[in-house]
Amino acid sequence: MHKVVISGTGLFTPPNAVGNEQLVAAFNQYAAHFNAEQAGAIAAGEVEPLAASSAEFIEKASGIRQRFLMDAAGVLDPARMAPCLPERDNEALSLQAEMALAAAREALAQAGRLAEDVDLVIAACSNLPRPYPALAIEVQQALGIQGYAFDMNVACSSATFGIHSAVNAIQCGQARAVLMVNPEICSAHLNFRDRDSHFIFGDACTAVLLERADLAASANVYEVLGTRLATTFSNNIRNNFGFLNRCDESGIGQPDKLFIQQGRKVFKEVCPMVGEHIVAHLEQLAIRPDDVRSFWLHQANLAMNQLISRRVLGREATLDEAPVILDRYANTSSAGSIIAFHLHKDRLGTNDMGVICSFGAGYSVGSVVLRKN
């Protein structure tokens, strides 16, 4: 069984930074217009008026201050409130593949690797551009990688599940190196007309290059000590968009075809599940939580991460121990924990250990324990 290391990571950040104030201004214009149009029905008690949002409410509820979007103009237009991303010709590179290439090239450069060194590409994200051909194969072809590629979707846990699959392929000799990418255009599945969730997501793409430890050329590598996955079914985070929607016209355009969640239930049920998962994984590897230098957690909600850290450490975690990128990037689904790792992994010294952990819809949770070599 070959030892596996992460030898490079990459990050693509979209060009449009949108602060809470901008998002709130668009939502409140929409809400005011809706309430004026529905004034009669509201007065008759037939329709609930829409409450205004506020930047203070968003930051208190989530810890988010801004997000990066692939398109801001469409999102901030009260008459549209959705990104404007024109369809591309079938012969053109897809938007998510374009994002993946930018992140992948940085990861390859960090690792000191070329396309010819990679045997497998995994595209792991919450939403794929189409059922087929696979996004991963498109990325593989664009980079000139031989071997094979496949897509996978485990919602916000996709990256850790992707790393697990990459580790298995390398350990058993199916691949020397694996490129795992997470292109997330979360703004396209977010209901910007829902006060409770219009602020949650941002867009981004991350990439991770994993390879055999004995072949790694990078000066900075992080050995994978273990991976652990768990799932349990829940409807509390759901998106009903799919290929069968056209078979029942009554559902087309309904709110459940975008992101919906029961936030309080998610908070109550997911936090203990994740905390126990991390503790059990560390125990399996005979590692004490206090011996872990950094926890790169999924960036969904600041209060969730603080509670999970307390459950694992038995105390408050410092920002150095549990870095936060949520305030700048918002929730970028599978990319979030990898952004935190990418931006803060250099803090680890030789033999320091860290945990990448992502969690979300499913429910699903995945953890990857690393040691800086």
Image (cartoon, rainbow, N blue to C red):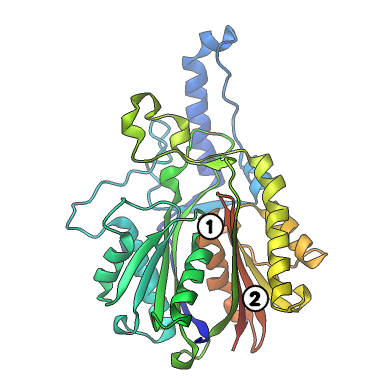
Residue 319 visible in the snapshot = no
Which x, y percent locates residue 44?
A: 58, 6
Query: Nearest the camera: 276 or 110?
Result: 276
Q: Residue at x 59, y 30 (%)?
A: 52
Q: Is residue 171 visible?
A: yes
Picture quadrant where residue 172 is located: bottom left
The image quadrant of residue 241 is top left
| Lateral position of residue 26 relative to residue 371, left or right | left
Crowd band around label 2 with a 10 angstrom C-alpha radius: few (<14), some (14–19), many (20+): many
Identify which amino acid the numbered label 1 is placed on: Tyr
Q: Earlier in the sequence, mark 1 or mark 2?
A: 1
Residue 329's label in the rendered image is: 1
- Name which residue lies at 40% across and 36% down: 77
SS for tag 1? helix
Distance from disc 1 to disc 2, alpha carbons, whole Å, reads: 21 Å
222, 365: nearer the viewer? 365
- Give the residue at x 49% y 55%: 154
Q: Give the residue at x 67% y 73%.
A: 294
Left/right of residue 98 with respect to residue 275 in the rendered view: left
Residue that mark 2 sits on = 354
362 with respect to 275 (left or right): left
